[in-house]
């Protein structure tokens, strides 16, 4: 097995999440060649030691990549980039897709790459930009059992990896995560708005709930964002909406009915036209639309342009 400094990485997609993830790899000592559709977003990594190329294909070719990591917007984007780099992938190399895509798309990519002698791992993440910057992301890896040990150290530079099954199951685990996240954000919004509307101090109510059975990372982080009305993106409404749609697709394939998920999906659908780039805690705004005259806190909304 190669050492850290010998393991070459092509990192494709250095946006909101990808950039801090790539930076964690650079800090850990991995040689990283980066590409992003908007080159300027990748160039900021040059001060950390990254090489930047104009195309995804060049990133793989110039790095002679042992590992290719994709962190892109959706399954179509991932499939498009992998088709571009396919001629440059070496037999025995590993492609790790850390985007959030449909399980069926991950399985199709696995089959495509396996036919070329390339290993595929789907390893979506949870933890948002905060987790990416801190290197504390939850990483859910769908990987062949014999391949997974080769990437544990690399993935550990970005967070806490866990193999959840064979290729394709990482995306299923991420959908389970997003189901819980999306639903809980909406419940926290309802609880805080109810507290305010009923005459309690919502900030004090949130604090009182801390440490009890209602405690959660969502109550801690997103509850505070709602109180501050700060909706600058960690995770974005458009990403959460995409994930909710993918959960419904996975549920249909599995033959299960998820009624609460359908309600939460409708909330995020309703926000897409006005607030696609807002943090997914903007579910509060959808709730306030349903309750005219009711508003959490008197602070001004802070929203992305």
Image: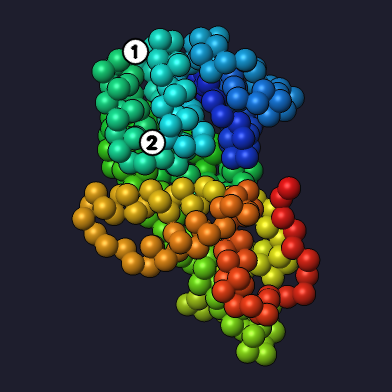
The crowd level at tag 1 (other Cα within 10 Å; few <14, some 14-19, many 20+) is: few
Q: Is residue 177 visible?
A: no
Q: Residue at x 34, y 12 (%)?
A: 91
Q: CA distance from mark 2 to mark 1?
A: 18 Å
Q: Farthest residue in the bottom direction?
A: 199
| Residue at the disc numbered 2 | 122
Q: Residue at x 59, y 52 (%)?
A: 273
Local packing at callout 2 (Cα closer than 10 Å; few below 14, some 14-19, many 20+) is many
Q: Does residue 48 lie above or below 289 as drawn?
A: above
Residue 146 placement (x, y as % from top left): 28, 30
Q: Residue at x 68, y 75 (%)?
A: 296
Q: Nearest the camera: 265 or 207?
A: 265
In x, y percent, where is residue 230? Answer: 71, 60
- Pointer 1: what residue? 91
Give the answer, above or below, for where 73 lies relative to 214.
Answer: above
Left or right of 125 on screen, residue 285: right
As helix, strand or loop, the secondary structure at mark 2 comes to: strand
Which comes before the other along the chain, label 2 or label 1? 1
Viewer-closest of 2 and 304: 304
Image point (59%, 82%), residue name: 194
Tags 2 and 1 in contact by the CB under 8 Å rule?
Answer: no
Q: Is residue 244 visible?
A: yes
The quadrant where residue 24 appears: top right
| The N terminus: image quadrant | top left
Asked which quadrant contains residue 37, the reply is top right
Q: Which residue occupies the foreground of this view, 226 or 65?
A: 226
Q: Residue furthest left?
A: 255
- The label shown at residue 143 is none
């Amino acid at each position: 097995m190669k050492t850290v400094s010998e393991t070459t990485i092509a990192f494709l997609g250095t946006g909101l999440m990808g950039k801090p993830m790539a930076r964690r790899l650079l800090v850990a000592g991995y040689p990283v060649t980066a590409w992003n559709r908007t080159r300027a977003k990748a160039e900021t990594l040059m001060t950390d030691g990254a090489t930047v190329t104009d195309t995804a294909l060049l990133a793989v070719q110039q790095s002679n990549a042992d590992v290719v990591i994709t962190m892109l917007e959706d399954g179509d984007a991932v499939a498009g980039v992998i088709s571009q780099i396919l001629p440059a992938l070496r037999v025995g190399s590993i492609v790790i897709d850390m985007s959030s895509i449909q399980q069926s798309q991950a399985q199709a990519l696995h089959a495509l790459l396996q036919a070329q002698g390339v290993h595929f791992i789907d390893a979506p993440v949870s933890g948002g930009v905060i987790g990416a910057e801190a290197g504390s992301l939850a990483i859910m890896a769908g990987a062949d059992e014999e391949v997974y040990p080769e990437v544990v150290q690399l993935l550990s530079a970005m967070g806490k990896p866990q193999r959840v099954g064979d290729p394709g199951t990482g995306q299923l685990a991420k959908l389970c995560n997003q189901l819980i996240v999306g639903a809980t954000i909406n419940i926290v919004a309802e609880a805080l708005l109810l507290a305010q509307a009923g005459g309690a101090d919502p900030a004090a109510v949130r604090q009182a709930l801390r440490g009890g059975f209602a405690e959660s990372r969502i109550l801690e982080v997103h509850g505070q964002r709602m109180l501050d009305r700060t909706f600058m993106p960690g995770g974005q409404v458009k990403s959460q909406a995409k994930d909710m749609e993918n959960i419904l697709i996975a549920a249909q394939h599995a033959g299960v009915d998820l009624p609460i998920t359908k309600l939460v999906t409708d909330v995020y659908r309703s926000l897409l036209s006005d607030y696609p780039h807002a943090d997914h805690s903007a579910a509060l705004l959808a709730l306030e639309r349903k309750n005219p005259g009711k508003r959490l806190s008197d602070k001004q909304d802070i929203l992305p342009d």
